[in-house]
């Protein structure tokens, strides 16, 4: 019996260390942050033709609107216009749609994206809609960004 407890204890230590090592990485932190955001908010209702990258971007955009985080919203923006202009647009989007983004939101994705994709967000609580333009950034990771304007 004592040998079995030693093996269990050793496995617990190894698994805990692996979990901590994985969680301490940037990728691990991003996954944990995503899981917390996903669990804490109403799920995005989706129609149309998203790809994983555009769907993830729009989901994060809705979360950043809801939490009122202009800094984090600007990080999702395409590098178009000045940094100040993107920041101003982010703050305006939050003022206009932030409270609505905390409730039910639908995203209607346009046709399968090649170089850009149009998405219409509908905020069910107010009935307001916001059209987004998404495009891939010229980067090695192929990340998509939203035009903040």
Image (cartoon, helix red, strand yellow):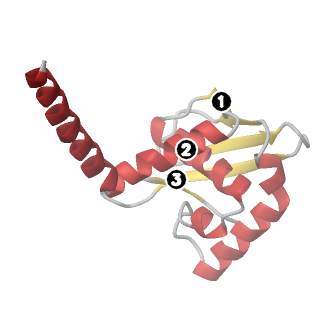
Left or right of 104 on screen, residue 15: left
Answer above or below: position of 102 versus 49: below
Residue 135's label in the rendered image is: 3
Q: Which residue lies furthest to the left in this view?
A: 3
Q: Position of residue 57 (x, y in %)?
A: 54, 48
Q: What element carries label 1?
A: strand
Judging depth in this view, the residue of 139 and 64 nearest the camera is: 64
Give the tally of numbered discs.
3
> Is mark 3 in CB contact (under 8 Å) with mark 2?
no
Instruction: Decide: few, some or many residues near mark 3? Use Cα within 10 Å; few <14, some 14-19, many ≥20.
Output: many
Give 60 or 146, whichever is nearer the viewer: 60
Q: Helix, strand, or loop for circle 3?
A: strand
Q: In this view, does 121 lie to the left or right of 148?
A: right
Q: How far apart are marks 2 and 1 (CA)?
A: 20 Å
The answer to whether residue 88 is above or below residue 20 is below
- Which element is circle 2 on? helix
Which of pointers 3 and 2 lies earlier in the amino acid sequence?
2
Between circles 3 and 2, the one closer to the viewer is 2
Query: Which residue is situated farthest in the right direction here?
Result: 126
Of callouts 1 and 3, the N-terminal one? 1
Q: Mark 2 near mark 1, Cβ–Cβ under 8 Å?
A: no
CA distance separating discs 3 and 2: 26 Å
Task: Choose top left, top right, bottom left or bottom right for residue 49.
Answer: top right
Question: Where is mark 2, residue-wise?
Answer: 36
Label 1 sits on residue: 46
Quadrant of image for the N terminus: top left
The percent position of residue 66, horizontal first and vertical second, equals 72, 53
Q: Foreground residue, 9 or 149?
A: 9
Q: Residue furthest front?
A: 2
């Amino acid at each position: 019996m004592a040998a079995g407890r030693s093996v269990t204890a050793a496995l617990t230590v190894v698994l805990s260390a692996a979990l901590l090592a994985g969680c301490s990485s940037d990728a691990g932190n991003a996954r944990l942050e995503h899981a917390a955001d996903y669990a804490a908010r109403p799920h995005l209702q989706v129609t149309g033709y998203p790809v994983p990258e555009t769907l993830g971007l729009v989901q994060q955009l809705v979360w950043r609107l809801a939490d009122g985080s202009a800094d984090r919203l600007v990080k999702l923006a395409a590098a178009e216009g000045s940094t100040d202009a993107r920041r101003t647009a982010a703050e305006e989007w939050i003022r206009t749609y932030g409270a609505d983004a905390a409730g039910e939101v639908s995203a209607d994705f346009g046709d399968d994206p090649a170089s850009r994709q149009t998405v219409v967000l509908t905020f069910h609580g107010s009935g307001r809609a916001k059209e987004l333009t998404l495009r891939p950034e010229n980067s090695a990771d192929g990340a998509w960004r939203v035009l903040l304007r």
